[in-house]
Amino acid sequence: MSLLPRTTVLPLLFFTAGPALGQEALAPGRTMRLEFPELPPTFQAMWDSTDAKPAVSVRLPDDYTAEGAFPLFVHLEGGHGGNGANLGVPLQITQGKGYVAANFPLFRRLKPDPARSWTIAVGADDAGKIGQAYRTILERLSSLVPNLDPGRSILGGHSNGAHTVAALLSVLDETTLASYGGFYFVDGGLDWSSFKRTEVLGGHSILFLVGGRDLNGDDDWWRGHLRERAAFLRQGAQWTKMTRWRFEVFDGVGHEFAREYFPKLREWAAAVDRAPASPKKATRQASRRVFARDSPEATSATRTVRELPGHPDGAASSGLGLSP
């Protein structure tokens, strides 16, 4: 049975450029496919050695109105990132309401060597290319949908998608800082941060979700490293009083994007609301400010969730701390 909410299926519209759309095109529930032939190849296209042009998929919420302000919810897939056409995760989290859902592809500076599988990971050296591409995408999107709310907007990803978010934050990309109020990392993107970056990101909400299953020497050999990094970042957030940062470990979950993550992300996203103050420091010119209001109520997860001890916002812990 599909996890996707039951919504009205509307025609898919394709756009390559142009000003803000008329209200007939900005109908609630409308799905749009935005093409960007001017951008460099996506990571997926590089890996597949195809000439597929970069594109993103965007869906307006069922409760969309021209008078309201709606945040953007962008999810980045893992692996090679796909072709920007998978709205499954953002729609499952938002349940099709309150947010403009989007899926962006990934970008790499260079194509990794297929014979060296560990080189697939997006890193800080890719941040320049990623930031330029996402800036172009956000500028187009904000011109088509002019009532986006950046303070409540969210950017996150799973695995290599999380690495991509980390790459942008590692260089304090100004467009990224100005366009989103919250970031989430699902089982990836933990090899970053410094005290300076932590200070700049103090006004943003950040959620780290890590699978806690002990695979006993299975292929997921770096599970212990992820858990150790989560514990390290939690300690740094506590020490620097980053009260908007949350860290949680899910028992019984490995590297997959587990269904138990959806209610947790939904609950967290509803509280994201960055103050409109400018970032303290940034490296790039910010694009036009882009983006939920109401979010559906969260449901409880079925597996054990371990909130790391000493949670900086003082939330109650389940008492099952992260073990080394």
Image (cartoon, rainbow, N blue to C red):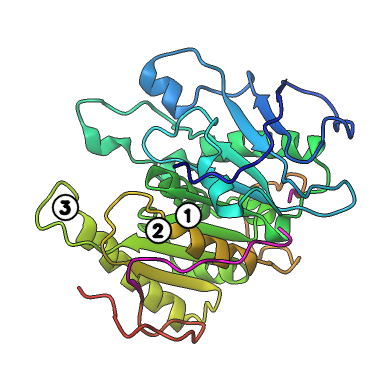
At x 61% / y 51%, what residue is drawn?
Answer: 95
Q: Are marks 2 and 1 in contact (CB under 8 Å)?
A: yes
Question: In the displayed structure, would residue 176 be above or below residue 268?
Answer: above
Q: Amino acid at mark 1?
A: Ser
Question: In the displayed structure, would residue 38 be above or below residue 224?
Answer: above
Q: SS at mark 3?
A: loop
Q: Which residue is mark 3?
A: 221
Q: Amino acid at mark 2?
A: Trp
Q: Position of residue 204 (x, y in %)?
A: 60, 66
Question: In the displayed structure, would residue 235 be above or below residue 72?
Answer: below
Question: In the displayed structure, would residue 72 be above or below residue 240?
Answer: above
Q: Which mark is residue 192?
A: 2
Mark 3, other Cα within 10 Å: few <14 / some 14–19 / many ≥20: few
Nearer-N-terminus badge (2/1): 1
- Which is in the foreground here, disc 3 or disc 1? 3
Q: Is residue 19 left or right of residue 275?
A: right
Q: Which mark is residue 170?
A: 1
Q: Residue furthest front?
A: 1
Q: Position of residue 155 (x, y in %)?
A: 57, 51
Q: Quadrant of the N terminus?
A: top left
Q: Position of residue 324 (x, y in %)?
A: 20, 73
At x 56% / y 18%, what residue is drawn?
Answer: 53
Could you tell me how far apart the alpha carbons at marks 2 and 1 are, in whole angstroms? 6 Å
Magenta segment, which residues?
A: 290-305
